Amino acid sequence: MTLSQKRIIFLTSVIALAFGIVPNVSAMHIMEGFLPVTYCIAWGVLCLPFLVSGFFSIKKTLSEHRKTLIIFAMVGAYAFVLSSLKIPSVTGSSSHPTGTGLGAILFGPSAMSIIGIIVLLFQAILLAHGGLSTLGANTFSMAIAGPFLSFGVYKLCQKLDVKKPVSVFLACALGNLFTYCITSFQLALAYPSETGGFGASLLKFLGVFAVTQIPLAVIEGIISAVVIIGLESYAKSELAELGYFKGGKSHVK
Amino acid sequence: MSSRTKTVVILLLICVLIAVIPLAVIKNSEFGGADGAAEELIAKIDPGYEPWTESLLEPPGSETESLLFCLQAALGSGLFGFCLGTLRERNRKRKDPLTDACP
């Protein structure tokens, strides 16, 4: 193992252990019917341009690089699996990762808006988890804001010459965390506290959503890095077509 | 084991630890689903708020719900594993073209 790998492992362990026992709360997507109608519509409309550009982006990638379909199927399946895993967290409640960061790195952030909305529709219709009325807001947080942040973090890491699996770890972990920060923001906007207004509400919701999410973000980051290490060794040619090896340092020599 | 395999194994173990430690440390919790606490919080901030719509279909009980969540995970990991297996096998054959020729 290289020194930087050791550092990462140390860092993640410290983060994981640093979170002791925090009050009992829990958090995930915004529940059906829990966002006023105007907000539902506004967030939904805001998603539309991303979904449209996502659709074209996927179409373009897959028609130009037919070979990458298998990788696309994999990142879709990955998001599907990760968002179904409710993992216990330090706050004494469970939440689940998003799984959209990895795809954003490989296929670009807008492509993930389509995959994200499919996952959210599945959960909203069949599982009563999230909801159709809040689909717009949830899509914005999980399938747009998170992937875009992941993509940005990844690009930044590449500029700074960070190793690829490490960049993937950071990008996916932060994207995951950001998703739930946006969820808190959306709820705080709809439910400003009487005493402290928007700010006080935001802090409360962040306490519920973001804190629960921190260890899960670390888990998602690690798993995404593991997947990318696997893909680097088995699917070099596909990754090359996606422009993955341009710039930055790769794990595979 | 190659150093890469070792890294992967260690990383996955860390993931398991992160998930298991809260279970071991926090005793008086059911690790309930996320949505519940946010609902309570909304009720605190705005006691008059009534959800204006309800889920179309709601799983009748936790058993059915866990079935559906399982299904989601199974479909996803099945497809993921299938693709990874395909890629791995392709790679193996490329490295050793003889396995293709003599079955």
Image (cartoon, coloured by chain):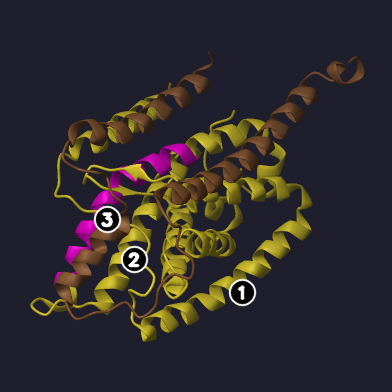
Chain colours: A yellow, B brown
Residue drawn at 54 percent across, 33 percent down = A229
**Residue closest to the far left:** A195
Task: Answer whether residue A203 is magenta in the image.
Answer: yes
- Residue assigned mark 1: A52
The foreground one among A123 and B89 is A123
Q: In this orientation, does residue A120 appear? A: yes
Q: At which x and y percent is residue A210?
A: 27, 55
Local crowd at mark 3 within 10 Å, few (<14), some, or many (≥20)?
many
User: In the image, which disc is placed on residue A144?
Assistant: none
Q: Quadrant of residue A32?
A: bottom left
How many other residues sit within 10 Å of disc 2, few (<14), some (14-19) or many (≥20)?
many
Q: Amino acid at mark 3?
A: Ala
The residue drawn where x is 57% and y is 41% is: B74
Q: Circle 3 sits on which residue?
A: A210
* Disc 2 from disc 3: Cα separation: 9 Å
Mark found first going from the N terminus, 1 or 2: 1
Given the image, what chain letter belongs to the residue carrying mark 1?
Answer: A
Which quadrant of the rendered structure holds the N terminus of chain A? Answer: top left
The residue range painted magenta reads: A200-224
Residue type at numbered disc 2:
Ile
Question: What element does badge 3 sit on?
Answer: helix
| Residue A225 location (% of width, % of height) | 48, 38
Q: Is residue B13 magenta?
A: no
From the image, tell me which residue sits under label 2. A182
Give the Cα distance between marks 1 and 2.
21 Å
| Residue plotted at (35% across, 33% down) | A8
